[in-house]
Amino acid sequence: MTDERARNHGTTSVQRTEELLRYGASSLVLREAFFRVRRFDDFQRVLDISRSVLSRTLKHLVEAGILERRRYQQRPDRYEYLLTEAGLELYPVFLVMKQWGEKWLGDDARDISLHHVTCGHVSTPQLTCDHCGGPVHARDMRYVIDGDA
């Protein structure tokens, strides 16, 4: 199957991921979850969004399996929202978006550098091939529907 036919073959995982992140304030909530914000009031304070938008967004992310809702207090019941394995695996997506935005959209906001705790250095994560370790660029990739290779 050609690259073009493969790319246009039904709803793609990229489209579904984009729809997931585009809902409400999903990308903002996830960004804060990566910085270990967990509680409703903390999300609302940091993001300065309405309670209804935040509530719908959290419900959406829980239903999608990206966040887990866990009670941390009774009377009244209070919940925190933790990243699931699927949610944690979205982190590289945010890193790439951060890097692209800093390079191409530049703004007056102060950039935040990433420090790799393991080695203690400022890190610029790279996207590499899991087989050869080389950098991944669009020009070097080909779309193939599984089974058509």
Image (tube, rainbow, N blue to C red):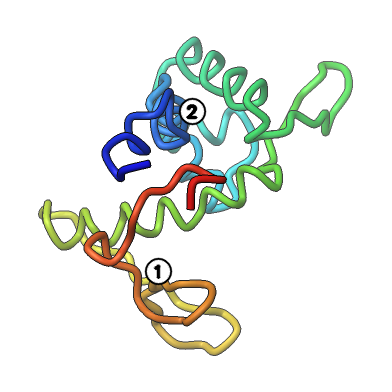
On residue 107, the disc is: none
Above or below, comparing residue 101 to residue 133 in the picture: above
Quarter residue 68 falls in: top right
Residue at the outermost right position: 74
Residue type at mark 1 is Leu
Task: Determine the residue positioned at 49% across, 28% down.
Answer: 44
Q: Which residue is mark 2?
A: 44
Which residue is outermost to the top? 52
Look at the numbered disc 2 and give the secondary structure of its residue.
helix
Quarter of the image holding residue 5? top left
Q: Which residue is mark 1?
A: 127
Q: Residue 41 at x, y = what percent?
A: 58, 29
User: Residue placed at 62% from the left, 18% from the top?
Assistant: 59
- Location of the N terminus (image quadrant): top left
Q: CA distance from mark 2 to mark 1?
A: 32 Å
Q: Which structural element holds mark 1? A: loop
- Give the class, few, some or many, for how many residues have Cα within 10 Å of label 2's Cα (few <14, many ≥20): some
Q: Nearer the viewer, residue 148 or 83?
A: 148
**Quarter of the rendering containing residue 4:** top left
Type of amino acid at the residue the image marks with label 2: Gln
57 to 116, vertically: above or below: above
> Which residue is at 12% across, 51% downward?
105
Counting from the top left corner in percent of width and height, residue 116 is at 51, 79
